[in-house]
Image (tube, rainbow, N blue to C red):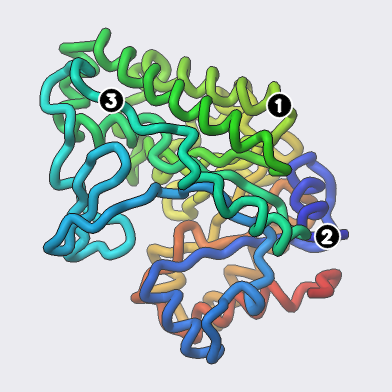
Amino acid sequence: MTKRQVIKAVLDGEKPPYVPWSFSFTQEAHERLLQHYGTDQLEPFLHNHFLGLGNGIGFFEDAGNDRVRDVFGVIWDRSIDKDIGIVEHAPLTAPSLKGYEFPDPLSDLFFADMPERIATYGDRFRVFSIGFSLYERAWTLRGMENLMIDFLDHPTFVHELLRAISDYNIAQARKAMTFDIDAVHFGDDWGQQHGLQMGPALWREFIYPELKRMYGAVREAGKYISIHSCGDVDELFDDLVEIGLNCFNPFQPEVMDVATLIPQYRGRLTFHGGLSTQKTLPFGTPEDVRAETRRLISLGRDGSYILSPAHAVEGDVPLDNMLAFIDEALSQPGFCG
């Protein structure tokens, strides 16, 4: 089976020949691995099963002084966080879309390299990613505190804003699905270490209806749906499965019971993540990392699980710990490289 076929089997609730994986690394961790392997291309050493396409967290232009501007007009401070940044300027200074123009969702920026990448990595499961896909896009445009107030004081505006964002995403996803892809991935953090940022009632009132529209457009085209949503959000899993979700990431073991959820949802929802980036990877020994990785592989042998650290691996993770989980994945019986 190709990597693409293995992932499809897992998402379809079948037992795979081995537990597949897809790893990602922040800039600092990525550079350390490149140096270790003596290469400028990491993928041949990782054998990732996903092929990431599209914009991920978006495209940015330099705004000077360690600042960048995204295509929505948000300015990000990257003086400390070099990978994403902190929102410094949100363009919607009032609860209104009057005078604001959304960027072009069909810009070639998002699609130009797709044919070449698909041809180069044809054996992988092809995933078109839309980052900051709804709630996160809303608060980056409006400001976190302002949006939280708007939920209560300006609900009509929030519905209008979220509808405009989901329209943008649906248009972009529909164009992406004219290419030979397998899934659309939406990134949108709703959780905290304990519970939802906006609470379940507001999530179901504002977020859920637009997710249903976006997921519906993808499922109508016969594609899989994957999401990334940090934090303690497992109370939403049944709602998400109901509207078509296939794969959930990051699956943080600090806030979710990994050993319970994998068998509980097997055949209905696949989990991608599970390896602790808050405890084991930065603070454990290589043997701790190997032990946790083996436990996750054991939990996932019957399907509905894709091995990965819960988030992109940070620069504070020792090199030997990174090499430990990579080695455990690649050493599985049944994987032939």
Q: Residue at x 79, y 74 (%)?
A: 337
Q: Secondary structure at mark 3?
A: loop
Q: Which is nearer the eye, 171 or 240?
A: 171
Q: Secondary structure at mark 1?
A: loop
Q: Give the quadrant of residue 26.
A: bottom left
Q: Secondary structure at mark 2?
A: loop
Whether residue 2 is visible to the viewer of this picture, yes or no, is yes
Whether residue 324 sits left or right of residue 66 in the image: it is right
User: Looking at the picture, how far across and down is residue 220, in whole percent?
Assistant: 69, 22
* Residue at the spot of label 3: 101
What amino acid is at disc 3?
Glu
Residue 303 higher or lower than 240, as above or below: below
* Residue at the spot of label 1: 221
User: Looking at the picture, how far across and down is residue 116, in whole percent?
Assistant: 66, 58
Dot placed on the residue nearer the N-terminal end, 3 or 1:
3
The answer for how far apart the CA atoms under marks 3 and 2 are is 43 Å
Identify the disc placed on residue 2: 2
What amino acid is at disc 2?
Thr
The residue mark sitting in front, 1 or 2, is 1
The answer for how far apart the CA atoms under marks 1 and 2 are is 23 Å
Q: Which is nearer the eye, 141 or 261?
A: 141
Residue 335 higher or lower than 259, as above or below: below
